Amino acid sequence: MRIQTLPILLTFLVMGVADAMGPLSSAAKENYGISTTMATWMPFFVFIAFAIFSVPGGVLAARIGKKNVLLLGLALNTVAVAVPAFMNPPYMLLLACIFLLGVGTTFLQVAGNPIMRDVSAQGDYSRNLALAQGVKGIGSAVSSSVLSIVSSVAFLSAMGWRGGFPIFFVLMAVALVAVATLKVNETKADVPPSIGSSLGLLGNPTFAMAVLGIFLYVGAEVCMATFLKPALAGLGFDDKASAFLGASLFFGILTFGRLVAGVVKVSPRTFFRLSAFLGLVGLVLLMTNNKYLAVAGVVVGGLGFANIWPMLFSITVEEKPERASELSGLMCMAISGGALVPMAMAKMVDNNMKTMAFVVPAACFAYLLMLSLKGGSKKA
């Protein structure tokens, strides 16, 4: 691994801070005395930033450089976490900071995924991107557990729900300095792009199908995060066991799978096919209505879900690396699938379809398996 990859890996680590807004919303609800609906605006503002700023972020990265967009994203995030780190803001100001964090994290995702190609040795892009996604998973897990982590530090514990923000601030500042000192030779487009030309890439069936694949993958992952615990509880596990054997086990296996993919040398397309197959098998096991097969499905599914994003992303970018920033913008925009696909599964859950509701993410993975079987001559 090249030394240039380390600042990028650190950037992926701090991307996970945005994922803490969901768990922190419960603590903020108690602090501000607001409704659950009002509290859910915290993760919503992160999601909506991806939908609005991903494509413009890709265009900006292509015009001013991916490193500069990383610096802009880190600067926005540093400001966003500094406010609750140093004061107890009114809720509307907090939401403004969360939105700013969402914009900054969007820029980090849009520029971070393709710049990893620029700092990777020939043939190492897919592995390094999988490793980076694993590091992001660690950042998400640690950030989401920050309240319990800081409880042992007196002055941070005294800050209550804000106790993690000084840590977030330091990490953002360190990442900003690390990226600022990074020297990288970026792959650039021959002609400066526009939002229109970026969206025009969807006219290429290969890119359109890949963007749809990301949309469905993220939607399926959010389905797992949302519905695994109640599904396992419905199969007879108690509350504590269903929480541990559900989302906690799934995301633990997912992070492990990404870290493993970062150190093994396998064809990205082969890894993509294997991942899609395992993900589909895991989802089928979850629909068997057997508690033990369901747990096996969580494990197998976690391994399958682990490397869909880095493999599909890297394979797609290698088709046209000079348009990497624009493609990244389109695929990050597809993260909005995490807001829409779970609605279909929620409707089935409300209709008392129980574990059969996992047919929704299973259909997503059936598409991904079909997509993975398409040919391709380029290697990431």
Image: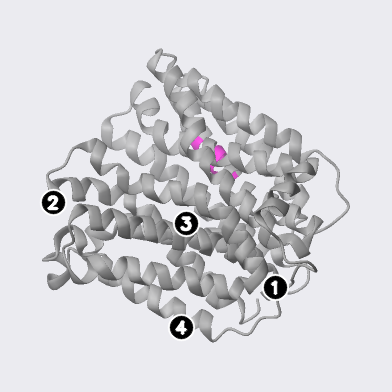
Q: Position of residue 137 (x, y in %)?
A: 47, 56
Disc 3 from disc 4: Cα separation: 22 Å
- Vertical side of 299 occupied by 175: above or below: below
The residue identified by callout 1 is 118
Looking at marks 2 and 4 on the same chain, the residue that comes earlier in the sequence is marked by: 2
- The residue type indicated by label 1 comes to Asp
Residue at the farthest right position: 377
The residue beneath circle 3 is: 137
Q: Earlier in the sequence, mark 3 or mark 2?
A: 2
Find residue 265 and report its image quarter. bottom right
- The span shown in magenta is 298-303
N-term-proximal mark, 3 vs 4: 3
Between discs 4 and 1, the one toward the N terminus: 1
Q: Secondary structure at mark 4?
A: helix
Dot 4 amino acid type: Val
Q: Which residue is mark 2?
A: 31
Q: Nearer the viewer, residue 289 or 71?
A: 71
Pointer 3 or 1: first along the chain: 1
**Residue nearer the viewer, 195 or 39:** 195
Magenta stretch containing residue 337, yes or no? no
Instruction: State the separation of the CA atoms marked 3 and 1.
Output: 22 Å
Which type of secondary structure does the marked residue at label 2 adopt? helix
> Which residue is labeled 4 in the image?
177
Q: Amino acid at mark 2?
A: Asn
Secondary structure beneath disc 1? helix
Q: Kindly check if marks 2 and 1 are in contact, taking CB atoms under 8 A apart as contact.
A: no
Q: Residues within 10 Å of mark 1 (few under 14, many from 20)?
A: some
* Predominant secondary structure, magenta span: helix
Q: Are marks 2 and 4 in contact (CB under 8 Å)?
A: no
Q: CA distance from mark 2 to mark 4?
A: 33 Å
Left or right: where does residue 153 sit relative to residue 2?
A: left
